[in-house]
Image (cartoon, grey):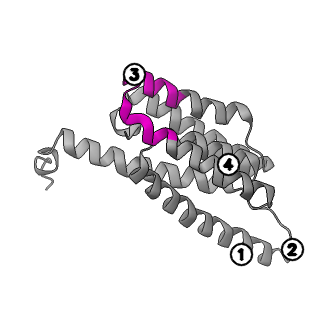
């Protein structure tokens, strides 16, 4: 079950604010706190509770576990930070399998853009560090906001299909 499309607006706002905090935190100090990841995790549990912990949530659990299983070796290899893996796994609880694929694609695209921007800035500053780290939490937050934003847009169209046709006429 895709929890973003069926959760109350206040809970989605808490999630978005937490993602913004994670992005800022990672950009500022290359670290995402356990508290921030925990808030994303708890908001997913609250969303699940509001839906009565239905059996359709098995996909959400699979997504979370799969991200942890794949993310731990990536962390051990130094490709991702521990906070990045925990944040992405907590976000996985919000999504079913199909939506998770969209999230992963959006995160990787955003990660490529963030990496190119950091490389360009380093070249402009003539910073020749070879092991310069990139705040991937920023890419995770951007990818998640883009994915959730598209899903919320689809939800609003499904709820109010007539709305695009009744826009005020501007002269």
Residue 74 point in image, percent of width and height = 72, 58
- Mark 1 to mark 4: distance in Å? 26 Å
Question: Which residue does the image show at 60% across and 50% down from the upper left?
Answer: 67
Secondary structure category for the residue under label 3 = helix
Q: Which residue is mark 3?
A: 50
- Per the rendering, the mark at residue 130 is 2
Question: Which residue does the image show at 11% across and 51% down from the upper left?
Answer: 165
- Mark 1 to mark 3: distance in Å? 45 Å
Q: Which residue is mark 1?
A: 120
- Mark 2 to mark 4: distance in Å? 23 Å
Q: Nearer the viewer, residue 165 or 72?
A: 72
Q: Classify 65 as above or below 49.
A: below
Q: Earlier in the sequence, mark 3 or mark 4?
A: 3
Q: Which residue is mark 4?
A: 85
Secondary structure category for the residue under label 1 = helix
Q: Earlier in the sequence, mark 2 or mark 3?
A: 3
Q: Within the magenta stretch, is there residue 58? A: yes
Q: Nearer the viewer, mark 2 or mark 4?
A: 4
Residue 137 point in image, percent of width and height = 66, 51
Instruction: Please state the extent of the stretch shown in magenta in the rendering.
Output: 43-61
Q: Nearer the viewer, mark 2 or mark 1?
A: 2
């Amino acid at each position: 079950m895709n929890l973003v499309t069926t959760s109350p607006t206040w809970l989605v706002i808490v999630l978005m604010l937490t993602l913004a905090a994670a992005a800022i935190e990672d950009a500022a100090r290359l670290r995402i706190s356990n508290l921030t990841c925990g808030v994303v995790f708890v908001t997913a549990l609250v969303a699940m509770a509001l839906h009565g912990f239905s059996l359709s949530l098995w996909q959400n659990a699979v997504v979370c576990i799969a991200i942890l299983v794949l993310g731990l070796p990536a962390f051990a290899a130094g490709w991702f930070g521990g906070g990045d893996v925990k944040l992405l796994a907590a976000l996985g609880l919000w999504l079913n399998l199909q939506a998770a694929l969209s999230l992963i694609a959006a995160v990787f695209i955003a990660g490529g853009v963030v990496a190119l921007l950091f490389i360009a800035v380093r070249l402009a500053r003539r910073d020749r560090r070879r092991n310069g780290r990139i705040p991937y939490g920023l890419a995770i937050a951007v990818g998640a906001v883009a994915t959730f934003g598209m899903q919320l847009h689809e939800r609003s169209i499904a709820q109010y299909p007539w709305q695009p046709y009744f826009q005020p006429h501007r002269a």
